[in-house]
Structures are given as structure tokens and as C-alpha cells.
Image (cartoon, grey):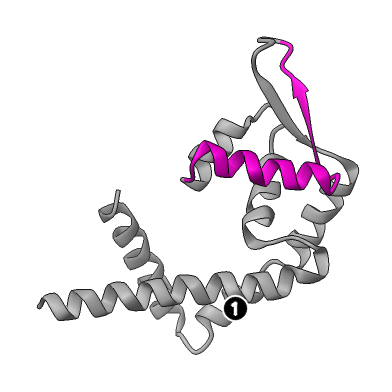
Amino acid sequence: MRNREYELARQVLNLANQIVKNRNKHLKELNITAEQADSLTFFYSDDNKSISDLKDYLHISHQTARGIVKRLEEKEFLRLSVSEADGRYKTVSLTEKGIHIVECLKRNGTHTGYQLLSGMTKTEQEQFSALMAKALENTK
């Protein structure tokens, strides 16, 4: 049984790596990575979010989140501002350039999802989604 569990875990890891690889390939023309695309999309919905909020959302270290924000700021997709409510707190917001990138992502963001689900029936897609959600919940 252990070997089966190990092989399944390896398959999931390989799938995750392939998804990131495919996403990065599609995002190359926008000059961003999959992680940066996820970050821009996260900040798009609310200007009152922080680097710490991104850390929690992506389940990464604060240092990694800070690095992502720094690179996106260097590309002029994001800007940091001191919070009006608390001067120790910095909020992250998208620039016009960043908003344009997110709008491009929304228009073209389904390539990997279509590829992942192709060949599955509607029922299989729903089962896959439910099983993935359950597996993710089991790993928390």
C-alpha cells in the first residue's frame, strides 16, 4: 500500500510541476511567472491587501512574498503605500500597467485548465474537482 501512496504523491507532484511549466510558457509573453500572475490577480480585487496577506494566500514565506512584490514593483505592475489606518502597515495596489496585465490574464487565463480537463467527461471533471478539494483539505 505504501508504494501506491508514494506513486500517487509523485503523480500529483508531477502534475503540479507540469501545470506551473505550462502556465509559465503561456505567461512568458506578458513577462511574468505563474506565481507573479497569481499575485497580481490576488491584489487586483482589493487595494487594502498587504504582503502578509499574499503570504497567507499563496502559503509561502514572508520573505518569498516580499520578493514577488519587489519584482512586480520593479516591473511597475504594483506600488506600495503606507496605510492610512496604521503607518507601520504597507498596502499593495496595482498600477495601470498591472491592471492591464490582469485583464489580459482574465481573457487568456484558461489555457492550462482546458488542457488539464480535456478528454474528461463533465462528470469526471466534477469528480476530479471534488477529489482534488478533498485531497487538499487532507493535507492541511
Q: Residue, x 46% and y 45% (percent of image)?
A: 59
Q: In terms of secondary structure, where does tag 1 sit?
A: helix
Relative placement, left or right, of 109 versus 19 is: right
101, 130: nearer the viewer: 101
103, 83: nearer the viewer: 83
> Around disc 1, counting alpha carbons within 10 Å, would you say few (fewer than 14), some (14 to 19), or many (20 or more)?
few
Could you say where residue 84 lies in the image, as x and y percent from the top left?
74, 11
Specify the amino acid type for callout 1. Tyr
Query: Which quarter of the image is occupied by the N terminus?
Result: bottom left
Could you say where residue 130 lies in the image, as x and y percent from the top left?
35, 64
The boundaries of the magenta stretch are 60-84
Q: Residue, x 49% and y 72% (percent of image)?
A: 17
Relative placement, left or right, of 32 versus 17 is: right
Magenta span includes 128: no
Relative placement, left or right, of 74 versus 23 is: right
Residue that carries the numbered disc 1 in the rendered image: 114
Relative placement, left or right, of 129 versus 45 is: left
99, 5: nearer the viewer: 5
Could you say where residue 99 lies in the image, as x and y percent from the top left?
83, 47
Could you say where residue 34 lies in the image, as x and y percent from the top left?
64, 61
Give the residue furthest to the bottom: 119
Q: Residue, x 12% and y 75% (percent of image)?
A: 2
Give the residue furthest to the right: 96
